[in-house]
Amino acid sequence: MRVFAEKGPDGVVIDDFIRAGVARGTFYNYFTRTDLLLVAVSESLEDDLMLSIEEAISDLQDPVSRLATGVRLWLGWVRTDPVWCAFIVRSRFRGPLVEQQINADLKTGRRPGGFAFVNISAARDLVVGTILEVMSRNMATPVSKAYSDAVARLILAGLGVSSAHINQLMSMPLPRLRRPVQSVSLP
């Protein structure tokens, strides 16, 4: 993750991983190219954070509350792990669990009093694209909690959630998020 975060997905070669401490035989035992490693690591990291979020919101049944809380937790994680954030931004891949959960919550939350959008793909892109842009901004200048909350409010408004409901969702305390297994911190 550190190698990809530092060099970007297109700037790495296998010897970069060898210099980072991975034995050449170990690398080739699992991967033949760096792009295959990139996909595997990206999916694993995103899905692990999504599993952590799913554990934290498991008591929430309402898909609007689930998505709102999930977005807030994800944006909170962005602020705490800059290496993870840089890797995810530069990898350009979305984990399958991320896609599955966002789409499920968007579909089931699309009802009167919930989400009110015309196109599910556009709604997904609004959520994912906005979060990725926040993550990109965080790489240059760390974002504040107030900024993250403002973004979460805008995402919910863009999905057609009423102002009163947004205020209610944003006032809910966030559940504790377990540290994703694959995450690393800066030394």
Image (spheres, grey):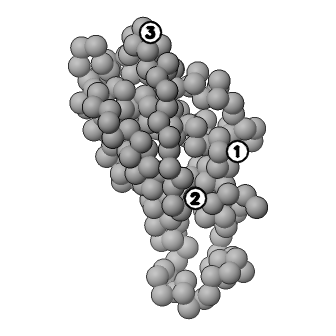
- Amino acid type indicated by mark 1: Met
Q: Which of marks 2 and 3 is nearer the N terminus?
A: 3
Q: In the picture, residue 84 is in which quadrant?
A: bottom right
Q: Which residue is drawn at 53% across and 62% down?
A: 182
Task: Compute the Cα span from label 1 to label 3.
Answer: 30 Å
Q: Where is residue 57 in the image (x, y as percent from the top left)?
A: 38, 38
Quick check: 128 above or below 68? below
Residue of label 2 = 183
Q: Earlier in the sequence, mark 2 or mark 1?
A: 1
The residue most toward the bottom is 25
Quick check: 125 above or below 183? above
Q: Is residue 184 visible?
A: yes
Q: Residue 63 carries which label?
A: none
Quick check: 13 above or below 164? below
- Amino acid type indicated by mark 3: Ser
Quick check: 108 above or below 154? below
Q: Which residue is drawn at 50% across and 65% down?
A: 41
Residue 146 appears left or right of 165: right
Task: Compute the Cα span from label 2 to label 3.
Answer: 35 Å
Q: Residue 163 carries which label?
A: 3
Residue 157 appears left or right of 109: right
Q: Nearer the viewer, residue 145 or 117?
A: 145
**Label 1 element class:** helix
Marks 2 & 3, CB-CB < 8 Å contact: no
Q: Residue at x 44, y 9 (%)?
A: 163
Q: Which residue is drawn at 60% across and 43% down?
A: 78
Q: Which mark is residue 139?
A: 1
